[in-house]
Image (cartoon, rainbow, N blue to C red):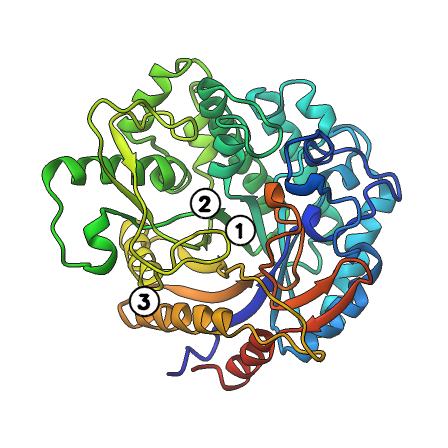
Amino acid sequence: MIFPEDFVWGAATASYQIEGAVKEDGRGQSIWDTFSHTPGNVADGDTGDVACDHYHRYKDDIGLMSELRLAAYRFSIAWPRIQPDGEGSINPRGLAFYDKLVDSLLDAEISPYVTLYHWDLPQGLEDRGGWTNRDTAYRFADYAQAVHDKLGDRVSDWATLNEPWVAAFLGYGNGVHAPGRRDPGDAMRSAHHLLLGHGLAARRLRSGGAQSIMLVVNSSPVLTPAQVNDPAAVPNEADAAVAHRIHTLLTRQFLDPAVYGTYPSEVLEAAARNGGTDHIQDGDLALINAPIDLVGVNYYNPCVVEAGPGLPADAAWPGSEGVRFATADAPTTAMGWPIVPDGLSRLLVRLSQDYPQVGLMVTENGAAFDDVVENGRVHDDQRVAYLDGHLREVHRAIEAGADLRGYLVWSLLDNFEWAEGYRRRFGIVHVNYATQTRVPKDSALWYRDVIGRNGL
């Protein structure tokens, strides 16, 4: 099972999850610093203060990447390292870290894929309203330009935002992520301002000569319970209607404006019922509709729904009245997420059909399991099976016509897993947080061999 000759193999991480060094070299405070240090927000009271200490160990981590034959490494920039307060003068020491990181990656013949925003908003901007404040979108564009001015001569591949649905609806809707606010109107406004920031930043990047620009979304096929194990199952009219609505709120809310310059009517109706639509100003959609080259797809599991007449909207889903969020009849990961590999092929094929103007890249795919080091090895057979199953579906999607350019496993390293702290391990490399020792798991060695043969 061979992949296209130019298929890109790599791994992904995020700044707050691995870097540590939260008070070094002029870095400012982020909303995740504040959130994680607030008792009750994160499992076991964990924070990202040290994480994987990647800030000091990046050269060794790049050595691991080379041993695993990675061709690409997707990482995110910590905005508070570049602008400690989110605006104003640039912190040269913060930029210097990423300057060295990029040079070291290129020396190792690994292509850097830069994500500009993976949720660590400077706390100073949150104090002024965060993503509910329209001005944050313009500050984001300034920050994007500053990073591109420094790294754009060597970095070709840029992602503006990572998972704006999560940033808006888990950060401002149900509050389980930073900044921990709980207001459906705030969530809808934040989603729009994130998109506005994406469009403004994409235009700055393009004018600066960026070759490839990407928007990364957490998309899933939205299925009824029967469809999970039977793609041919035909849902009843009520279930089909709620599945369409949730797909619109999860995926089309972001990709329709970015690719087509329009909001689906269901999104506008949800906004109207939750704080109104005054935040959507004339000309915004034209700004958001900046040309992009790729959609990054982060896939872990399907979203399973059915009609639930009379149910109120879920706090994370403004507009989801009358929807019951169901469970899938499938094995699960340590996160409790159902393992449905063919959900990935179904998703990729649909996205290629709905947005044929842009290419696709799987920018995150992976699983958490309860890994243990035994005699210097980590035998994570479940993760190997997970990755093998999903890569077979990636191949199936390509054969079905999906314009898929590459696959980045989540994640290179075990890391700070947001509200789950350090108790969930997604890495293909095990990290002992007490000693910072790295041990490539069996899945890493398996993935190395997949890359070596460009196939399964």
Q: Of discs 1 and 2, which sits in the foreground?
A: 1
Q: Of discs 1 and 3, which sits in the foreground?
A: 3
Q: Of discs 2 and 3, which sits in the foreground?
A: 3
Disc 1 to disc 2, how far (Cα)? 8 Å
Disc 2 marks a residue whose amino acid type is Pro
Q: Secondary structure at mark 2?
A: loop
Left or right of 16, for residue 308: left
When asked about the image quadrant of residue 100, the answer is bottom right
* Mark 1 lies on residue: 213
For the point 43% across and 20% down, the residue is 280
Whichever of callouts 1 and 2 sits on the residue coming sooner in the sequence is 1
Say which of 367 and 399 sits in front: 367
Residue 291's tag is: 2
* Mark 3 lies on residue: 397
Return the x and y of residue 185 as percentages of the image width and height: 45, 18
For the point 45% across and 51% down, the residue is 336
Disc 3 marks a residue whose amino acid type is Ala
Say which of 327 and 280 sits in front: 327
Disc 1 marks a residue whose amino acid type is Ile
For the point 37% across and 39% down, the residue is 250
386 in relation to 180, above or below: below
Whichever of callouts 1 and 3 sits on the residue coming sooner in the sequence is 1
